Image (cartoon, helix red, strand yellow):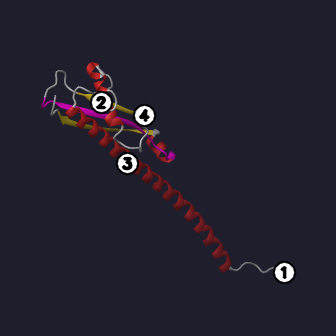
Amino acid sequence: MKTEPMTLDRQTTRRQRGQSLVEVAISLTLLLTLFSGIVDLGRAYIASVALQDAANEGAIYMSVEPACRYVGDGGSSVCNDPNNAEYRARNAGGGELDWSRVEITVNRPPGYSIGDSVTVSVHYRFALITPIISQLLSRDSLILTASATHLIISE
């Protein structure tokens, strides 16, 4: 049995198939990396919107009830949950975040009165899920921050 030697056309076709496979592998790797980065960016945007909503909700509550920043303020049960700014901020943002990792700071001036400003700041350690993006940034999380300031409208 004698086999025929490969012709030039068959060799070229094989090489082109191998070249196409390498091109697809490289392109797919780059596209998947880009896509996963876009997913992380979208998640960060959703978290940022939730944090801004939370800060705004807390500041709005403080503008109406400036005495109730945290549980136990005011010396009585008046400021217990849900009647304090921290609770309102923590429960305004929805289920997109792990609220146990959120730090909420409520600031108002001492001896406050109508017209003074109150500020609620919310800080969140956002975990990145893309390992390549984490390596590029040389960290596995980002700190997202939102704050809102409103004027006190009642005592």
Q: Disc 3 residue type?
A: Ile
Residue sitting at x 65%, y 80%: 9
Residue density around tag 1, few if under 14, some if 14–19, many if 20 or more, within 10 Å: few
Q: Is residue 24 above or below residue 150?
A: below
The residue carrying mark 1 is 2
The residue carrying mark 4 is 101
2 and 3 marks in contact (CB < 8 Å) = no
3 and 4 marks in contact (CB < 8 Å) = no
Q: Disc 2 residue type?
A: Asn
- Tell me the distance, in whole angstroms, between the alpha carbons under discs 2 and 4: 19 Å
Viewer-closest of 110 and 28: 110
Question: Where in the figure is residue 128, as x and y percent of width and height?
Answer: 46, 43
Q: In the rendered structure, which disc, 2 or 4, sits on the residue that comes first in sequence?
A: 2
Q: Disc 1 residue type?
A: Lys
Q: Is residue 100 left or right of residue 72?
A: right
Where, quadrant-wise, is the C terminus in this rendering? Answer: top left
4 and 1 marks in contact (CB < 8 Å) = no
> Which of the labelled discs sits on residue 84, or is there none?
2
The residue tagged with tag 2: helix, strand or loop? loop
Question: Where in the figure is residue 33, as x and y percent of width and height?
Answer: 49, 54
> Which of the labelled discs sits on residue 46, or is there none?
3
Q: Which residues are magenta?
A: 114-131
Viewer-closest of 26 and 1: 26
The residue tagged with tag 3: helix, strand or loop? helix
Q: In the rendered structure, which disc, 4 or 1, sits on the residue that comes first in sequence?
A: 1
Q: Disc 4 residue type?
A: Arg
Residue sitting at x 26%, y 40%: 56
Give the mark toward the camera: 2 or 3. 2
Q: Is residue 41 above or below residue 142?
A: below
Q: Residue 79 magenta-drawn? A: no
The residue tagged with tag 4: helix, strand or loop? helix
- Tell me the distance, in whole angstroms, between the alpha carbons under discs 2 and 3: 25 Å
